[in-house]
Amino acid sequence: MFHLPFWRGSRRRHQLAMRLYRWAAEHGSRAALATYGHLLHFRGEDIASRIQGGIYLERAADLGDAKAQYQMGRIYEQGFEHYFRPDPVKALAYYRLAGEQKHPLAVKRMIAVYDEGALGAVIDPARAECWRKRQASLPEEAVRT
């Protein structure tokens, strides 16, 4: 809907699209939870919107959306306001879930985690190499991101 030429740049179209995303997200659509959550969290106008976006992203991640899992890993690694406190255990778990679904940035982060000993993990060259093998199996354009 955002990409249709009809009403291009229209505030009304934007509001309608956001209402539709919200309705679909509240009715459990994993894709809507991920998209609407991303829009709210990363482009929301106020803290409440950004927190609500994080909640939607977490629901999408728990439903198995790889992009949302990666983003929740970032949110829990860095923390956000007082709602999402930094939690290295949750961050690592979400990165791992996304990496297992071959999300290229999550795989890259898992390599760094085991190379550097980040997020409370110990430096483990064998695990880092395992993640490098997964990275090697990804399409070349995905790895460059």
Image (spheres, rainbow, N blue to C red):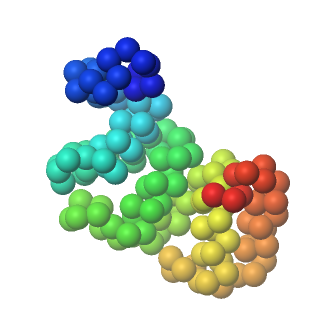
Name the residue nearer the viewer: 32 or 124: 32
Q: Is residue 98 left or right of residue 28?
A: right
In the rendered image of this protein, does residue 84 appear above or below residue 66? Answer: below
Residue at 33 percent of width and 67 percent of height = 79
Quadrant where the N terminus sits is top left
Q: Position of residue 69 (x, y in %)?
A: 50, 51
- Rendering quarter of residue 115: bottom right
Q: Position of residue 15 (x, y in %)?
A: 23, 25
From this viewpoint, is residue 100 visible? no
Q: Is residue 128 left or right of residue 87?
A: right
From this viewpoint, is residue 39 visible? yes
In the rendered image of this protein, does residue 24 appear above or below residue 101? Answer: above
Name the residue nearer the viewer: 108 or 142: 142
In the rendered image of this protein, does residue 101 appear above or below residue 8? Answer: below
Residue at 25 percent of width and 46 percent of height = 44
Residue at 77 percent of width and 67 percent of height = 132
In the rendered image of this protein, does residue 50 appear above or below residue 115? Answer: above
- Rendering quarter of residue 37: top left
Residue at 78 percent of width and 49 percent of height = 139
Name the residue nearer the viewer: 9 or 55: 9
Q: Position of residue 67 (x, y in %)?
A: 53, 47
Quadrant where the C terminus sits is bottom right
Q: Is residue 114 left or right of residue 17?
A: right
User: Which residue appears farthest toward the top when viewing the image?
Assistant: 6
Q: How many discs appear? A: 0
Q: Position of residue 48 (x, y in %)?
A: 17, 49
